[in-house]
């Protein structure tokens, strides 16, 4: 029977939930808002499958056939590109699998915009639900089971998720399938759903209206200076650049990430997925000819299947091969886990009694000396320029 004693050793992938033959495992939120498995001892038959399938307890991270091919790419469809977080390549890969008669699994926000859950889609119209970054951990639910049933019936499946979710999927399946295509992302880490829940309540109380849409990566001010965009039922809109929005500041400061994110073993060059997608940060220095500040994807291919899937969209994208290592080094989250900030414990203690906006502001505030130093550096940079 699975029992979580060290929360840093559980990434919440749901593999144990999907493999349990008696359905005795449920996912329960802790005081920080993260989901962890909890078994019903009355229904447990002590088969140990939940422990055996865990991708953290049984480290099966690396794909020995993993490649290191890299590309800069973006979709030629400008509308699609604008609606995407980076270059729109994820949607093109999904469309290719749907054209095969397949099913795509990915993360979508719930109608109330409080949570993110994994769902399956079978047509291109529904792909909009999966498009765009969601800075929350999705609840996988029974999607591993559903994907396996489709694969056993001979249907193509594209399964997208964080690296640890892809690790959980392969651990559950126990093997690869010819018609399975896996796509992971370069993941910064997953923030507390409880903090997002409180933050949306804060935004609604400020506007005195319900939320009608959320887009974490609005490009109105450009791709590199993206904004959090939240629409409201009264027609108004909240729009702030990521450096100014409180939720994004706390997330990027690593203050309320899941404990396992600080010890992530899935941040490795030898990925299990067929394709890794990310923003191509630093493209203005490495490939300035492809940089128009409307979004570009770093496409990192790891398998022959991934290569074939990528090139199946050849006529729909602009792309150029590059040294994958150059892009990896520009995005440290690809191979380096977040560090636990000393403010984390204080933040989670404060949020129990203090408003979420004040708690985030308090624990992300820079010392006065640091603010002055950065301001002087910016002035110096402008003068030199």
Image: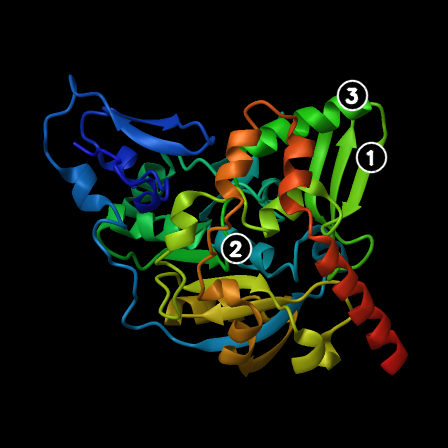
Measured in 3D between alpha carbons, the distance from the residue under mark 1 to the one under mark 2, in whole angstroms, is 27 Å
Q: Earlier in the sequence, mark 1 or mark 2?
A: 2
The residue at the far top in this view is 42
Please report whichever mark, 2 or 3, sits nearer to the chain's N-terminal start. Answer: 2
188 is higher (above) or lower (below) than 373: above
Quadrant of the image occupied by residue 263: bottom left
Q: Nearer the viewer, residue 381 or 152?
A: 381
Going from the N terminus, do you reach mark 3 or mark 1 first? 3
Task: Name the residue rendered at 57%, 81% in the picture.
Answer: 321
- How far apart, in angstroms, are the residues tagged by discs 3 and 1? 11 Å
Residue 271 percent coordinates (x, y): 37, 65
**Residue reaching furthest to the front:** 369
Bin the neighbour count of mark 3 within 10 Å (Cα to Cα): few under 14, some 14-19, many 20 and up: some
Under circle 3, the secondary element is loop
Residue drawn at (44%, 27%), measured in percent from left and top?
A: 31
Q: Which residue is mark 3?
A: 209
Among the 4 quarters of the image, the one containing residue 230: top right
Q: From the top left corner, tell me how far across and down residue 124 is, in percent.
A: 60, 46
Vertical order, 42 against 283 (above or below):
above
Query: Is 258 left, or right, of 62 in this rendering?
Result: right
Distance from the alpha carbon under mark 2 to that under mark 3: 31 Å
Q: Which residue is mark 2?
A: 188
What is the secondary structure assignment of the residue under circle 1?
strand
| Relative image position of residue 21 (x, y in whole percent) | 18, 30
Total number of numbered discs in the rendering: 3
Vertical placement of residue 105 versus 203, above or below: below
Q: Point out which mark residue 237 bears.
A: 1
Q: Residues within 10 Å of mark 1 (few under 14, many from 20)?
A: some
């Amino acid at each position: 029977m699975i029992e979580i004693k060290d929360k840093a050793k559980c990434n919440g992938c749901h593999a144990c939930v999907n493999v349990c033959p008696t359905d005795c495992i449920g996912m329960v939120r802790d005081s920080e808002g993260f989901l962890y498995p909890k078994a019903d001892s009355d229904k447990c038959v002590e088969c140990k499958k939940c422990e055996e399938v865990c991708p953290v307890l049984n480290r099966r991270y690396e794909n020995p056939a993993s490649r290191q091919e890299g590309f800069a790419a973006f979709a030629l469809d400008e509308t699609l590109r604008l609606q995407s977080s980076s270059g729109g390549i994820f949607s093109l890969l999904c469309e290719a699998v749907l054209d095969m008669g397949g099913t795509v699994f990915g993360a979508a926000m719930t109608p109330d915009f409080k949570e993110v859950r994994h769902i399956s889609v079978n047509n291109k119209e529904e792909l909009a639900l999966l498009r765009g970054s969601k800075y929350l951990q999705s609840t996988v639910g029974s999607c591993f089971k559903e994907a396996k049933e489709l694969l056993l019936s001979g249907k193509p499946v594209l399964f997208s998720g964080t690296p640890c979710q892809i690790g959980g999927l392969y651990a559950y399946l126990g093997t690869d399938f010819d018609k399975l295509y896996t796509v992971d992302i370069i993941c910064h880490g997953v923030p507390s759903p409880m903090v997002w829940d409180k933050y949306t309540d804060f935004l609604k109380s400020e506007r005195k209206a319900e939320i009608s849409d959320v887009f974490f990566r609005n490009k109105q001010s450009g791709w590199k200076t993206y904004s959090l965009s939240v629409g409201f039922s009264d027609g108004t809109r909240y729009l702030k650049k990521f450096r100014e929005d409180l939720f994004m500041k706390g997330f990027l400061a690593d203050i309320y990430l899941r404990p396992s994110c600080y010890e992530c073993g899935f941040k490795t060059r030898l990925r299990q997925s067929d394709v890794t997608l990310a923003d191509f940060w630093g493209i203005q220095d490495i490939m300035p000819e492809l940089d128009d500040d409307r979004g570009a994807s770093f496409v990192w291919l790891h398998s022959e299947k991934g290569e074939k899937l990528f090139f199946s969209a050849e006529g729909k994208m602009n792309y150029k091969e590059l040294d994958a290592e150059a892009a990896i080094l520009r995005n440290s989250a690809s191979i380096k886990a977040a560090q636990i900030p000393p403010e984390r414990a204080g933040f989670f203690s404060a949020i129990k009694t203090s408003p979420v906006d004040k708690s985030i502001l308090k624990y992300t505030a820079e010392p006065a000396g640091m603010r002055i130093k950065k301001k002087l550096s910016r002035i110096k940079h402008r003068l030199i320029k």
